[in-house]
Amino acid sequence: MAFLTLVIGNKAYSSWSLRPWLALRHAGAVFDERVIPLRQPETKPEILAHSAAGKVPVLHIDGATVWGGATVWESLAICEAVAELYPAAGLWPDDPAARALARAAATEMHGGFPEVRKAFPMDLKRSPAERPVSEAAVSEIARLCALWGDLRGRFGLGGPFLFGRFTVADAMYAPVCARFDTYRVPLDEVSLAYVRAVLALPAMIEWRRSAQEEPWEIAY
Ligand SMILES: N[C@@H](CCC(=O)N[C@@H](CS)C(=O)NCC(=O)O)C(=O)O
């Protein structure tokens, strides 16, 4: 048994679960994974058995560590814990100013973009097809592209991600990249290249493959 267990929802639909899973994979962590299928009669009690917050993802850290055992909920807080558990993975930029912006970008995703999330639910079982962009989502898409373009332009020299190398900020935006791909949302060149880089991550490919093999279907 690994000292970390990540409790997640179905890989096809649980965008919040994907984020810390990517961070753990990027860190090279060995962890157990427990999938709780969403929207089933037993979903809520099963999740509540892991976290009183009643949402996945949840990370259990074994008591035999210096952490003395902990259960962490909320995707961004879990990513933070992974960054602390695996400092060598460089899950935040080294430069303090860049790190502050990476945290701001990650937090903006954690608390924002409700229209994009509503209009384009993550569905990794769906064949890619264009979906009209709702008026409400237009300004959020423009903000996403502007943010990505700004960060890539200022910090992206060392690699294809927002701060060059992969960081928690990319983990947080990965589901948006998947949504933009599934619904063929028109993007500028820089944003499209960024989406492609995220989707080409081996961990992302692995997650998508597992998602497509899952038996559960949810019709959004
Ligand atoms: N703010 C939370 C959101 C978590 C969330 O909404 N998770 C969904 C699955 S993607 C969930 O647990 N749904 C089950 C339910 O509400 O019963 C986070 O960042 O982890």
Image (cartoon, rainbow, N blue to C red):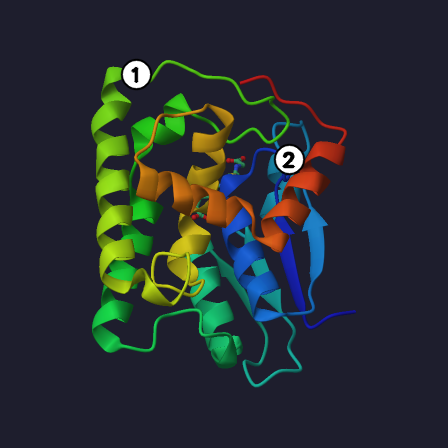
- Is residue 90 found left or right of 206 in the rendered image? left
Horizontal and vertical percent for residue 148?
29, 48
Mark in front: 2 vs 1: 1
Q: Which quadrant, please, contains the N terminus?
A: bottom right
Which x, y percent locates residue 215?
Answer: 77, 29
Q: Amino acid at mark 1?
A: Ser
Mark 2 residue type: Thr
Q: Which mark is residue 43?
A: 2
Quarter assignment of residue 100? bottom left
Label 2 CB-ligand 1 distance < 8 A: yes
The dot on residue 203 is: none
The residue depicted at 31 percent of the width and 27 percent of the height is: 115
**Above or below, comparing residue 188 to residue 27 in the picture:** above
Q: Nearer the viewer, residue 173 or 51?
A: 173
In depth, the one of 113 and 72 nearer the eye is 113
Dot placed on the residue nearer the N-terminal end, 2 or 1: 2
Residue 41 visible from this viewpoint? yes
Q: Identify the residue at the far bottom of this view.
A: 66
Which type of secondary structure does the marked residue at label 1 adopt? loop
Point 60% across, 31% down: residue: 124
For label 1, the residue is: 134
Occupied quadrant, residue 2: bottom right
Q: Residue at x 60, y 37 (%)?
A: 44
Mark 2 to mark 1 CA distance (whole Å): 31 Å
